[in-house]
């Protein structure tokens, strides 16, 4: 704790750039570098409480090393645009935090850091250099250490000796001999760090090694005799200068006072909500914020106006425009408002909401707006009341407008539109905060409805997302029964299977290890078994599924590890967890279904995450058997058949693909017949399986490399297979190309129903990011349209069952499947209406087909 912490800013920028991906604001601004950089800064400030703190960056343009060696760093590419655009935000954050920042013209950050560290150490101060650059090992000493925050690793003299085989005083000699590919410094061919360390141990110094190169035998001696002078010339290039003339006094590098309003404004701009909470800045006003309009502006033309409430109630006889309902947290009061009237009322209990609020929200003629109305529907449903007349949920509306955000806090949405008024920040008393939040929702709802209309998303909201809110609430309220005894038995079976798999792993490895530890597994695979290293991470070897699948082609151990991981995940995530999720009051699990998470429009679920239950196989079967119907009921499962391929046929209009589905033929067998050039009758199981992989791979923009890995074939064979597919279905290839170019020109991909997903990665200079964007441009219209279809079907089926007065409830949604709990005598009638609703959700060039079954448990129904 304490001491001086000097940050290698340039190094940290690039490490954050490569280590993190996917952080963007709703407007598409990349933020992963700023997030990673600030995470490191906050961690150091929080955990180390430094006495002194400074960040040093490289200056633009050449430095003294370029004069010594013109090719210095000549191999480096220009700074990527998506990194360059984030650097000003890092500087703004550091300024708001009051942290000193140094950039010295013509002097590299390494030399500035080295000079500061040496001066402070000579003055008796403890110094920590925060960097991942190995060159700084030459500075390590009694008062100077290194800290790599990404690996949580501290480097002192002992660690230097372990890494280089020499002490810090000889690190420069090792670097001069080995060179540095990153900085384009050529070393002596054939001399790596271990060899360099052995030579230094034997000869004492770089100069002595070069002088006595004639004594060294073999290729090593030849290389030293030919390139020894190059190693001597490298020395000033790899030596950190610790005597740079600096005007700053190092002892004065102390954090100043923070500008909390500006810091809060920046974090909101970047949508770093977690940092706002962690730093206690949620209630901090930002410069120039505008108070919310009170009362809100009149609703747009055509808004429904409800009846006049009773005299003395909210509104005092004025007609109701919109009623705002904002549910509080567990046990907290709710905020309700309309116009200038607002109140904090107890959360609904057995008596529901107090009058006249309970009567108003239950009246379908009264338009209701709110933030998070699904939770309000659930709470009211459990209290025996209904929330009718939902007009607009500001959280769901904001999600449609900006599907890439990680969260949609009411306060942030209001501030972004200049509506950060009463109740926008945290308050010690929820009863004081909730009325203001409700008033803010009224103003925000007007603004968001106008934005939806302007973006062409209002129909999507009104026809799909809005009517889905009470449907999801009903699913959560109803819940599903599980057989806890069956799960307990399954848990015991899985424990035995995992123990057997571990014995098999230990036999294959020749020793015991923890298969869940990436570090231990990496050591077994790559150091003991000498399997080829694929990817490396910031902390060592990569042992992710893609790496293990490739290694499994050469050795049995990785395949057993994959099986162990799969069983362990199912046991720990479902089998052992499900019994604990049963509500004692209902005997059911009440999973939560989330409408505002997936950028594609897909629903997600939690407690438990039903999307992770295997669709097929023994494991999926046993888990689904534990989801059971109530006495006298059956579970009915209705599943779209090959819905994304049918959407592809519709959107591409490919005549051959359309004909396959219109004729009701097996699309995978038909594809196999076409790409392998064999009669349909000659297609075997292997051909059909490989064709199925191609069919679904096309949907996700799969490359020849990805297909080759999945099928265990060569990349060239996979390339030819994809080419054969596009020859048979040429309109599909043209359509996919149009999707990518259209998304690149517009900046977003779009579904058949008009849902939009911004894809700024398409214009990135980073090739990996650009290719990711291209895959998203292909996948989003297909998967997003499928998401819109299943949502439409959920609304339509629920409405049809209610109108028919049938005793059936929708209880689960997983991927393209809906599960209903149905009174046993009504199964056939319910099946008919559900299939009609799903198959009629949208008219396409090809028929939508639904497979439906019923049973006492989910597996039997499926």
Image (cartoon, helix red, strand yellow):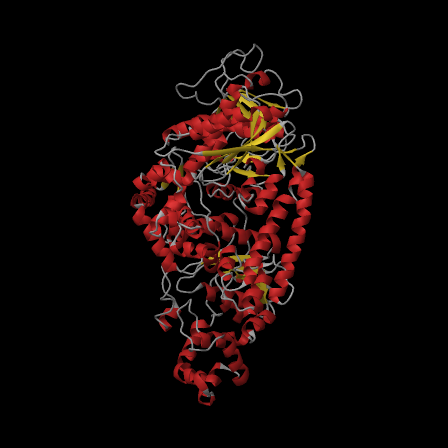
* In the rendered image, the vertical position of residue 828 relative to residue 57, given as above or below: above
- Splitting the image into 4 quarters, where does residue 561 fall? bottom right
Q: Toward the viewer: 484 or 350? A: 484
Q: Toward the viewer: 652 or 847? A: 847
Give x and y (percent) for residue 376: 57, 27
Q: Residue furthest front?
A: 681
* In the rendered image, the vertical position of residue 675 relative to residue 27, given as above or below: below
Q: Residue at x 54, y 37 (%)?
A: 862
Q: Toward the viewer: 465 or 613? A: 613
Q: How many marks?
A: 0
Q: Is residue 507 left or right of residue 663?
A: right
Q: Residue at x 49, y 15 (%)?
A: 306
| Residue 84 can be seen in this image | yes
Q: Is residue 113 left or right of residue 582?
A: left
| Residue 749 can be seen in this image | no
Q: Residue at x 34, y 51 (%)?
A: 678
Give x and y (percent) for residue 500: 65, 57
Give x and y (percent) for residue 804: 51, 19
Quadrant where the N terminus sits is bottom right
Give x and y (percent) for residue 671: 37, 46
């Amino acid at each position: 704790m304490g001491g001086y912490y000097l940050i290698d800013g340039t190094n940290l920028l690039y490490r954050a750039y490569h280590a993190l991906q996917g952080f963007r604001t709703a407007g598409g601004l990349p933020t992963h570098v700023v997030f990673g950089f600030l995470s490191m800064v906050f961690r150091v400030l929080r955990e180390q409480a430094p006495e002194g703190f400074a960040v040093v960056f490289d200056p633009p343009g050449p430095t003294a090393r370029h004069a010594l060696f013109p090719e210095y760093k000549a191999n480096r590419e220009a700074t990527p645009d998506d990194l360059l655009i984030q650097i000003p935000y890092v500087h703004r954050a550091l300024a708001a935090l009051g942290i000193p920042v140094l950039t010295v013209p013509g002097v590299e950050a390494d030399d500035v850091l080295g000079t500061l560290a040496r001066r402070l150490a000579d003055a008796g101060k403890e110094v920590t250099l925060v960097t991942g650059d190995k060159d700084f090992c030459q500075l390590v000493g009694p008062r100077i250490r290194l800290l790599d925050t990404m690996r949580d690793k501290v480097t002192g003299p002992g660690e230097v000796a372990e890494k280089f085989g020499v002490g810090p005083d000889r690190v420069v000699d090792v670097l001069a001999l080995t060179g540095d590919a990153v900085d384009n410094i050529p070393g002596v061919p054939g001399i790596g760090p271990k060899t360099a360390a052995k030579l230094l141990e034997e000869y004492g110094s770089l100069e002595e090694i070069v002088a006595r190169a004639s004594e060294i035998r073999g290729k090593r001696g030849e290389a030293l005799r030919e390139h020894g002078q190059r190693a001597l010339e490298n020395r000033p290039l790899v030596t950190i200068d610790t005597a740079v003339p600096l005007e700053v006094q190092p002892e004065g590098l102390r954090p100043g006072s923070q500008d909390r309003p500006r810091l809060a404004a920046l974090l909101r701009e970047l949508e770093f909500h977690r940092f706002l909470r962690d730093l206690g800045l949620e209630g901090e006003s930002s410069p120039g914020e505008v108070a919310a309009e009170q009362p809100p502006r009149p609703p747009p033309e055509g808004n429904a106006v409800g009846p006049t409430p009773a005299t003395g109630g909210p509104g005092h006889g004025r007609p109701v425009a919109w009623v705002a309902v904002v549910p509080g947290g567990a046990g907290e009061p709710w905020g309700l408002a309309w116009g200038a009237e607002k109140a904090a009322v107890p959360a609904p209990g057995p008596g529901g909401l107090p009058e006249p609020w309970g009567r108003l929200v239950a009246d379908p003629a009264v338009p209701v707006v709110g933030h998070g109305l699904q939770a309000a529907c659930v709470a009211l449903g459990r209290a025996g009341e209904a929330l009718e007349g939902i007009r607009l949920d500001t959280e769901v509306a904001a999600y449609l407008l900006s599907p890439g955000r990680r969260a949609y806090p009411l306060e942030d949405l209001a501030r972004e539109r200049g509506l950060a008024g009463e109740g926008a920040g945290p308050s010690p008393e929820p009863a004081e905060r909730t009325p203001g939040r409700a008033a803010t929702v009224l103003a925000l709802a007007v603004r968001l409805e106008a934005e939806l209309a302007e973006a062409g998303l209002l129909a999507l909201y009104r026809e799909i997302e809005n009517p889905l809110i009470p449907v999801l609430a009903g699913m959560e309220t109803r819940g599903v029964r599980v057989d806890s005894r069956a799960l307990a038995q399954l848990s015991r079976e899985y424990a035995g299977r995992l123990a057997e798999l571990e014995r098999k792993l230990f036999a294959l490895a020749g020793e015991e290890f923890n298969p869940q530890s990436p570090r231990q597994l990496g050591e077994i695979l790559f150091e003991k078994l000498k399997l080829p290293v694929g990817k490396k991470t910031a902390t060592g070897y990569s042992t992710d599924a893609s790496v293990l699948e490739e290694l499994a082609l050469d050795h049995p151990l990785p395949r057993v590890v994959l099986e162990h991981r799969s069983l362990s995940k199912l046991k720990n995530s479902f089998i052992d967890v499900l019994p604990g999720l049963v509500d004692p009051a209902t005997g059911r699990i009440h999973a939560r279904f989330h409408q505002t998470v997936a950028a594609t429009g897909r629903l997600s679920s939690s407690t438990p995450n039903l999307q992770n239950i295997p669709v097929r196989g023994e494991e999926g079967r046993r888990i689904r058997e534990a989801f059971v119907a109530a006495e006298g009921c059956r579970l009915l499962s209705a599943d779209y058949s090959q819905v994304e391929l049918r959407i592809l046929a519709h959107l591409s209009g490919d005549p051959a693909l359309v004909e396959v589905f219109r004729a009701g033929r097996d699309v995978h067998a038909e594809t196999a017949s076409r790409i392998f050039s064999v009669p349909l009758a000659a297609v075997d199981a292997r051909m059909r399986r490989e064709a199925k992989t191609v069919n679904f791979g096309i949907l996700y923009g799969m490359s020849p490399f990805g297909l080759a890995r999945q099928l265990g074939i060569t990349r060239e064979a996979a390339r030819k297979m994809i080419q054969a597919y596009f020859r048979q279905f040429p309109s599909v290839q043209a359509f996919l190309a149009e999707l990518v170019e259209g998304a690149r020109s517009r900046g977003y991909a779009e579904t058949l129903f008009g849902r939009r997903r911004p894809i700024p990665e398409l214009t990135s200079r980073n090739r990996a990011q650009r290719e990711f964007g291209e895959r998203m441009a292909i996948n989003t219209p297909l998967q997003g349209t499928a998401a819109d279809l299943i949502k439409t079907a959920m609304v339509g089926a629920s409405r049809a069952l209610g109108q028919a007065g049938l005793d059936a409830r929708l209880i689960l949604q997983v991927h393209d499947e809906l599960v209903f709990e149905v009174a046993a005598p009504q199964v056939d009638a319910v099946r008919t209406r559900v299939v009609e609703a799903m198959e009629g959700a949208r008219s396409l060039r090809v028929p939508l087909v639904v497979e439906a079954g019923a049973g006492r448990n989910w597996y039997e129904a499926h």
